[in-house]
Image (tube, helix red, strand yellow):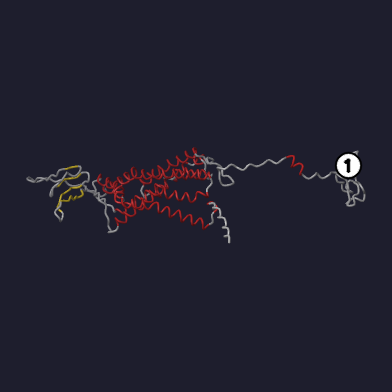
Amino acid sequence: MPSAAKPPAPPPSDPAEMSLGDHLEELRRRVILALIGILPILITALVLGKPLIALLIDPLRDELRAASQPSGLLATGPFETFAVYLQISLIATVIVGSPWILYQLWKFIEPGLYSNERSFVHILVPLSSILTLTSAAFLYFVVLPVILAFFINFGSQLGQSSTPVVEVGEGIVLPSLPVFDGDPPDPQIGQQWINTDLMQMRTVVPKRDGSPVVIGAELVAGAGITQQYRVSEYIKTVLNLALAFGIGFQTPVVVLLLGWAGIVDRKTLGRYRRFAVAACTIAGAVLTPADPLSMMLLAGPLYVLFELGMVLLIVFPPNWGKAREPDGDADEPLPEVEEPDQEATAADAPAERPTRDIFDEDGTPDPNAYDDPPPPPGGWRGADGDEPGDEDGRA
């Protein structure tokens, strides 16, 4: 007995015309791929978590040593340092893995975009990534050293009193220690020296097993308020600043989007520059800690980025992308429309309704013009085949 014919396989569905369930399934698939892709990055970040913390606290330690303050940070809880370690590792994973995450997001939304919208995304995503990296570098190398130096020196000088100078009695010899800008090679137990790089007085002492170990005591200048910070509070401040600068540095992207959407144009933005200055100042005050220095360090670059957005509007005007086509793809040409045949149209058109002259030969109106309807072009023809013009053939 012959087997029944298998039904043909259904054609693959268009990603742009999927149902809600298909969209949710595609979203779940993209989320799983994104998580699998950043898993190796997370493992690497956990391995490099300690160097990352050291990298973030280096600017603070440098400014504390320059102000002759203790350079060590405090942890007031047993889990505080470990929590900071996990926080830094997770944030580093998200930052490094953001290209892969954005790629999966792009593959999810790409089928629903027109070609001109895709071209805009090809500009905005690299521009946003470059601005984010620029904000991180600007914060680390410019903003942090300036802010930390200002606040550390400001706090250490509050309430500071002068130290009296007294005469040294006869026979008293002040001890002296060698001063190095590092540690000497192979020091022995009991030896002491001053390390100016760490601003510590270093001593070699034996451990319980008898092996030597170098310990240091912080050298602190006379200060009204000794500057010592919790590691969790400092990392939290740095991350908040990084978020604020990362958002603020997206100003050119916002200006481009507003220009492409037709909400604003370059001439309008140029007329309202003073309002842009005020908006940048307010944003600097809201996004940064409540101090004028941080506000100015963010407000200044914000206005520069606003001007950069206006320049980009010249390079990439609103009509830069191709126009949206009816079929949703700007790359495909419009379908050709056939011109109608004038002769066929004239032949198929209905005959004009016959007209009737309502005037006599001398130009006066004929009173009987509307007594009977005008005859058709072929004359009257009845059902019995009367010739045109027959009186009985009228309808």
The image shows a total of numbered marks equal to 1
Measured as percent of width and height from the top left, residue 85 is found at 31, 54
Identity of the residue drawn at 17% across and 51% down: 213
Residue 168, x across and y down, in percent: 11, 45
Residue closest to the far front: 1
Left/right placement of residue 218 relative to residue 53 reads: left
The residue at the far right in this view is 391
Dot 1 amino acid type = Phe
- The crowding category of the residue bearing disc 1, from other C-alpha atoms within 10 Å (few below 14, some 14 to 19, many at least 20), is few
Question: On the rendered structure, is 186 left or right of 291?
Answer: left
Which quadrant would the N terminus be assigned to in this image? bottom right
Q: Nearer the viewer, residue 26 or 305?
A: 26
- Is 251 or 343 nearer to us in this picture? 343
Front-most of residues 360 and 158? 360
In the rendered view, does 127 fall on the left or right side of 45?
right
SS assignment at label 1: loop
Name the foreground residue: 17 vs 155: 17
Q: Where residue 212 sits in the image (x, y, percent)?
A: 15, 51
Q: Is 105 displayed left or right of 156 in the figure?
A: right
Percent across and percent down for residue 314 are 50, 38
Among all residues in the image, which is located at the extreme bottom?
A: 1
Q: Which residue is mark 1?
A: 359
